[in-house]
Amino acid sequence: MQAWINGQPATSIDVADRGLAYGDGLFETIKVSQGRAALLGRHLERLQEGCQRLMIPCEMQLLRRELDDYMQLIGNGVCKLIVTRGMGQRGYALPQQSVVQRILQASSFPQWPAAYAEQGIALFSCQLRLSQQPKLAGLKHLNRLEQVLARAEWSDSTYAEGALLDEQERVVDGVFSNLFIVQNQRLLTPDLRRCGVAGVMRAELLARAQAAGIEVQVKDIPRSEMLQADEIFTANSLYGIWPVRNYAGRCWAVGKMTRRLQQMIKDLTGE
Amino acid sequence: MQAWINGQPATSIDVADRGLAYGDGLFETIKVSQGRAALLGRHLERLQEGCQRLMIPCEMQLLRRELDDYMQLIGNGVCKLIVTRGMGQRGYALPQQSVVQRILQASSFPQWPAAYAEQGIALFSCQLRLSQQPKLAGLKHLNRLEQVLARAEWSDSTYAEGALLDEQERVVDGVFSNLFIVQNQRLLTPDLRRCGVAGVMRAELLARAQAAGIEVQVKDIPRSEMLQADEIFTANSLYGIWPVRNYAGRCWAVGKMTRRLQQMIKDLTGE
C-alpha cells in the first residue's frame, strides 16, 4: 500500500528533510488488526513525549486522524509512522518555523515462526555496548545506527534477537524489543534512563502485571543478574512475548510467569 | 540548484530509505571554489573509512565522477554529499543487496561575519554531554540528534559556535567544527576515539602544522586544561579557523600560533 505524507498519498520526501540529514525525528511501529491498534494510546503518548523532548511541534490531533484513516485502509498488518522536523536551512540550528512531516507506511505482518512464542528463542550476545545519552534515552528516535551495527553482528538465523548491554555491563534491551527477567516471582526490567528504547509493550506489561498483583521492578540489571534469572523473555508490540531458552551458553525452560504473562496479553497477540 | 541522486537530477528520496528510517548513512559538507574542492581527497578518504566501518558498499569511483561533474555546475558554494544504505525490508538487518543512494545537494556559501576569523568568536558552553560510542566515533554519520539538541541550547547570536564535552568533562569538539588549543607553543586537539567527528580541516591542520615543525599532539583534554590554554580556536573545512576570544567566562587575545595557522591555510580559505 502506498505511503502517506501529511495525509496525502506520496512515496518520497525532500532530500533536504532533516529526518534524512540528521535523523531528526521519531518513529512508531504499530500493529494494526481490523483497522485498529490496541496500543495506540501508548504509541501516541510516547511519540508526544518524544516530540516534547526534541522540541518537534507535531500536531497530534491531526496526526491521530490521519493515522485512524490509514489504519482503516491497512486492515491487518503493520503501520510505521515517522515524524520529522521537516526541511531546514543548512546547519543544525532549529528552523524558525518547522514544517513537521508526518509519514505513514504500511507493511504486512512479519511471519515469525510460531515456535518463538511457544518454545522460546535463542538470544544473541551482542558485542556492541550502547552509548549513554539521558537526553535521548527511552525515545524511539531516528538515530538507530547502534541497532543497525548490533543486528549486523549475527546472520545465523538460530538467533531471533540480540541482547544489548551498556559500557558498565548492565542489560539494556534487545535490538528490537525489551528484556524482562523473573527472579523469585518478581518481574524485573532494565531502567532506561541512560539508553534504550522504552517499548509500548514493556509499559503495557508492567501495568498489567502490577494490576494482577505481581511484584514488578524497574532497575539496573547487571548481566550477571540476568544470567542467574529464573526466567528471561523479550517483548515488543508486534509479537508480544518470546521466552528466552538460550543466552550466553546457558539454557532456560519456559517459566510459569512467562506463560502467565503471555496469557495475560492474549487479547493483544491473538488474531 | 537541483539535487542529484545517483547522478540524475532529483529532489526526493523514497520514504523507505534507511537513511531516513535509521540515519543509516554518512555525509560530507564540501567547500567548492571554481568547480573544485581543495580538500576533496580528505573528504573521500573519511567517507570511504565510514563506508567500511558501517559496511556500506559505496562505489567510490562512480561517486567521485558524479561529484566532479556536480561541483563543476556549482562553481562556488557548498556541496553536501549524503550516502545512504538505500531501501531495505522492515527491520534493522542489513539488506542482502544494498542499493546505495548517492545524494548531492548544493547551497550558497554561508555568510559568516568576517570578524569571526579576524577578531575571534565567543564559544558557548553546551550542557549536553556527548555519549561515547567507539564504533561510530570520528565518522560524519547521519545520527546527529546530539548536535541538534546541543545547537538548540543557545539562540543568542553572540555565540558563533558551542563546545561539547563528554561525560568525563573532557573537551571533544564543537557542534559543527573541531577544537584546538595551544599550550607552550604546542598544538593540541582532542582524541576522538570515543566520540566526536574527525573533521577534514582538523586532519589538514595537523598535517600542515607538523610539516612546519610545530609540535602537535592528539590527546584527551580535560576542560580545565582548555581553560588554561594560551590560545583556543575552532576549525572546519568551510570557514577555516576562528580564534576563540571568549569561553566559559574567560577571555583570550588572538594568539600568534592561531594567526600563523590561519596564514598557513590561506590557500584553502581565501576567495
Image (cartoon, coloured by chain):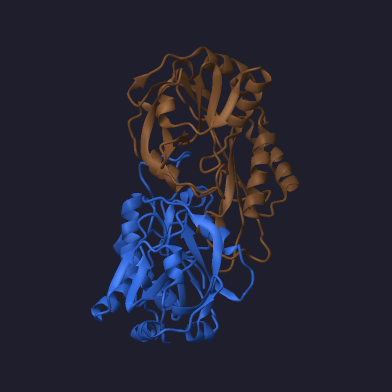
Chain colours: A brown, B blue
In depth, the one of B219 and B117 nearer the eye is: B219
Considering the image in quadrants, where does the C terminus of chain B appear? bottom left
Q: Is residue B222 left or right of residue A185?
A: left
Q: How many marks?
A: 0
Residue at 56% from the left image edge and 43% from the top image edge: A140
Q: Name the spot of residue B247 as percent of width and height, x first.
A: 53, 72
Judge by depth and name the residue closer to the eye, A155 or B61. A155
Q: Decide: is A58 above or below B35.
A: above
Determine whether A262 is above or below A141 in the image. Answer: above
Q: Nearer the viewer, residue A156 or A162?
A: A162
Residue A229, relative to residue A167: is it above or below? above
Could you tell me which residue is drawn at 37 percent across and 76 percent down? B37
Q: Farthest residue to the top: give it.
A: A256
Give the residue displayed 47% in from the left and 19% down from the top.
A231
Q: Position of residue B164 (x, y in %)?
A: 49, 62
Examine the rendering and report whether any part of residue B102 can be seen. no
Query: Residue A130, how many percent across, how many down?
Result: 44, 43
